[in-house]
Amino acid sequence: MENEILGWIAAVGIPLAYALGLASAIDAVMEARTAQGATAWALALILMPFLALPLYWIFGRARFDEYVQALRDFDAEVEARLADARSGVLTDVLVSPETARDERTRGELLAFQRLATLPFTRGNHVRLLIDGEATFEAIFDGIGRARSYVLAQFYIIRDDRIGRAFQERLIAAARRGVRVYLLYDEVGSHSLPRRYLRELEAAGVRVSGFSGRRSWLGRFRINFRNHR
């Protein structure tokens, strides 16, 4: 009797597992963020459904509806603020693509405006930073000259020579009355000691860590990062 029950379970369970594996593989192909992830999950779900099915539905299933809706809401908010910014720009500082010296430049200006969703204005300049030394020299100089606010955002911050010099300048800016905000990535800066952040906060710097997760399952989706 027991053997008959086990045989019946195997006869039903094995085809069902493979059918669910195939359906989940299709779901993985449709929903995975990368081609590599889709391929890996699809192969595992088809070839090893008994092992892969629980792993996929617990850890691997990324629900993107909430991300899509959040992105749409954010885009709508940004567009509303951009409309306010456009209306507040003085017409005498605007640069019209129609005044370009040739057709190629006009096309480039139009393309950049559409990408940025903001018009060109006069009074801007660009400096090419060719290495780390020049880059951090410019960053530190900008922090030192700031009078209203400093917005700093890094994927990786370390408690080393450069990291401490960066910290000292943020603290100095905050102490002279500048509003200072720092956003770091909790994965990229995982080795950063809490002492480093507490010293910034004690000086008045607003510090936030980007985690990218809203539930305990989110800790397994470490690629939803902010790599800036």
Image (spheres, rainbow, N blue to C red):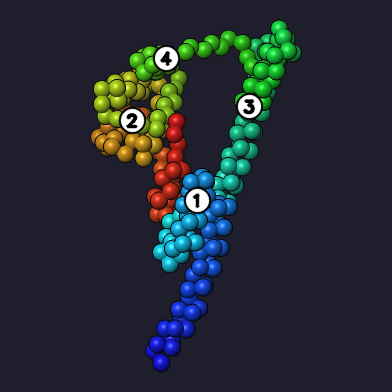
Q: 119 or 22: nearer the eye?
A: 22
Marks 3/1: CA–CA distance = 33 Å
Q: Which residue is mark 4?
A: 130
Element under disc 1: helix
Q: Residue 77: where, in percent of width, then height?
A: 61, 37
**Three-letter amino acid code at the position of disc 3:** Leu
- Which part of the image, by quadrant, shows the C terminus? top left
Q: Earlier in the sequence, mark 3 or mark 2?
A: 3
Residue drawn at 54 percent across, 63 percent down: 22
Residue drawn at 41 percent across, 45 percent down: 222
Q: Earlier in the sequence, mark 2 or mark 1?
A: 1
Q: Is residue 57 visible?
A: no
In the figure, 18 relative to 120: above or below?
below
Q: 104 or 41: nearer the eye?
A: 41
Marks 4/3: CA–CA distance = 25 Å
Disc marking residue 39: 1
**Taking 88 as reference, is 126 left or right?**
left
Q: Residue 176: where, in percent of width, then height?
A: 35, 18
Element under disc 4: loop
Q: Nearer the viewer, mark 4 or mark 3?
A: 4
**Three-letter amino acid code at the position of disc 4:** Ile
Q: Nearer the viewer, mark 4 or mark 2?
A: 4
Q: Earlier in the sequence, mark 4 or mark 1?
A: 1
Q: Which residue is mark 3?
A: 115
Q: Residue 102: where, in percent of width, then height?
A: 72, 9
**Taking 83 as reference, is 200 left or right?**
left
Q: Earlier in the sequence, mark 3 or mark 1?
A: 1
In the figure, 218 relative to 179: above or below?
below
